[in-house]
Amino acid sequence: MYSINVPLPSAVTSLAADLAADLPLAQRRGRGEHTLVAKRLGDGDHAAYARLEAQGREVLRGQPAFEAEISEIEQFETAATGPSPVVYLAVESPGLVGLHERLCERFDPVDEMEGDEYVPHVTVARGGDRDAAARLVEQGIDPIRWTVDELTFYDADRNQPVSRVSLPG
């Protein structure tokens, strides 16, 4: 699966990894494996990716930098896919939501995950003990704010960025 992602500052990935330690029975992401998906683009081979990237770059042309903030831990009690619950860091960013909506005009939204149901987030952990997840969600965290001044085209099968796009400041 290819997607357009928001690179995360190290403060966010460190927080997610630290919080995941409180969910020992859950599936956790390792350091450097946390993502913030702006829009899933689709599957395919290298030729399909080249077409998806070209279309994505066209939509992103002129996209300004925008602000993002994490200030809460939340959960999806029942995930659209995969193990539940999903504990996550909630991302507040009108700029990201607006970008997602623009990308949905070009790339079909994934049912139950995108379009009107899009919730910008960074997954901390999936599955495991529901009581431990509920306790973690009740914790407070210090807000983390950053400016999103680039996006990445991401290959989820290889768990790595393929290319980057700078956003004008």
Image (cartoon, rainbow, N blue to C red):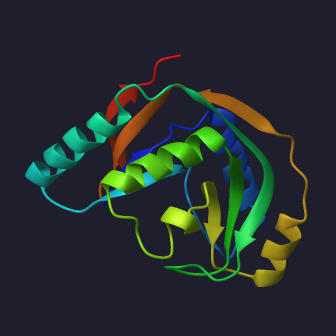
- Can you tell which quarter of the image residue 131 is in? bottom right
Name which residue lies at 68% across and 80% down: 128
Residue closest to the far left:
47
Name which residue lies at 66% across and 43% down: 93
Do we see residue 137 in this rendering? Answer: yes
| Rendered location of residue 142, percent (x, y) | 87, 41
How many marks do you count on the picture? 0
Residue 8's place in the image compared with 87, above or below, is: above
Which of 160 and 169 lies nearest the eye of the viewer? 169
Residue 39's place in the image compared with 134, above or below, is: above
Name which residue lies at 48% across and 50% down: 100
- Can you tell which quarter of the image residue 75 is in? bottom right
Do we see residue 33 in this rendering? Answer: no
- Can you tell which quarter of the image residue 27 is in? bottom right
> In which quadrant will I find the N terminus?
bottom left
Residue closest to the far top:
169
| Rendered location of residue 98, percent (x, y) | 54, 45
**Taking 22 as reference, is 155 left or right?**
left
Name which residue lies at 50% across and 76% down: 112
